[in-house]
Image: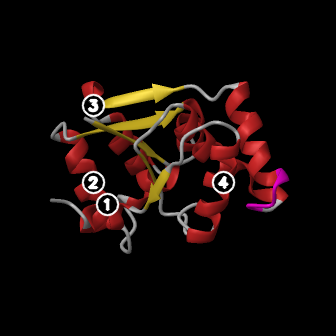
Amino acid sequence: MQRFYFDTSVFGGAFDKEFEEATLQLFERVKLGKVICMFSDLTETELLSAPENVKKHFKNLPKKYIEKVIVTDEILILASKYVAEHVVGKTSLDDCIPIATATIYKADILVSWNFKHIVNVYRIRGYNSINIRSNYHSLEIRSPKEILEYED
């Protein structure tokens, strides 16, 4: 079963008119056991300030198809490399942590609705260049819509 790391934006996307349809279809794949939803302790912290409907949706995901991972020092070091090598600006370190987390925990795909700092072809090339030079694997980064477009 594939393991997708869900950036916090995906949880909010379930209740955003623009992103709702694709997001709910992706979460349906989780509920059916077709994919594991990975998230981190950082995601849980960020969701504390989310609207109640987003929190409830997160809490109702089937426990057997979710995987919680912990943000470690190794992850923070890798995320800092993305900033140090100007993949994103200094103020975007928080956007780099999910990428480093998905990389370290070997997620099959990182899923996000953040097109400025995450799901962006130029940024993805930068992240993966650093990953490879740092002896990590290259990471697939996609929006929920892209994942659903290429389903069998």
CB contact under 8 Å: marks 1 and 3? no
Q: What residue is shown with label 4?
A: 129
The residue carrying pointer 3 sits among few (fewer than 14), some (14 to 19) or many (20 or more) residues within 10 Å by Cα, namely some
CB contact under 8 Å: marks 3 and 2? no
Query: Looking at the image, which is closer to me, 138 or 59?
Result: 138
Q: Taking 27 as reference, is 3 above or below it?
A: above
The residue carrying pointer 2 sits among few (fewer than 14), some (14 to 19) or many (20 or more) residues within 10 Å by Cα, namely many
Q: Amino acid at mark 2?
A: Leu
Q: What residue is shown with label 1?
A: 147
Quadrant location of residue 91?
Answer: bottom right
**Residues in magenta, as a range:** 84-88
Q: CA distance from mark 4 to mark 2?
A: 28 Å
Residue 26: mark in rendering: 2
Q: Quadrant of the N terminus?
A: top left
Residue 65: mark in rendering: 3
Q: Position of residue 75 (x, y in %)?
A: 67, 33
Pick whichever of labels 4 and 2 is earlier in the sequence: 2
Q: CA distance from mark 1 to mark 2?
A: 8 Å
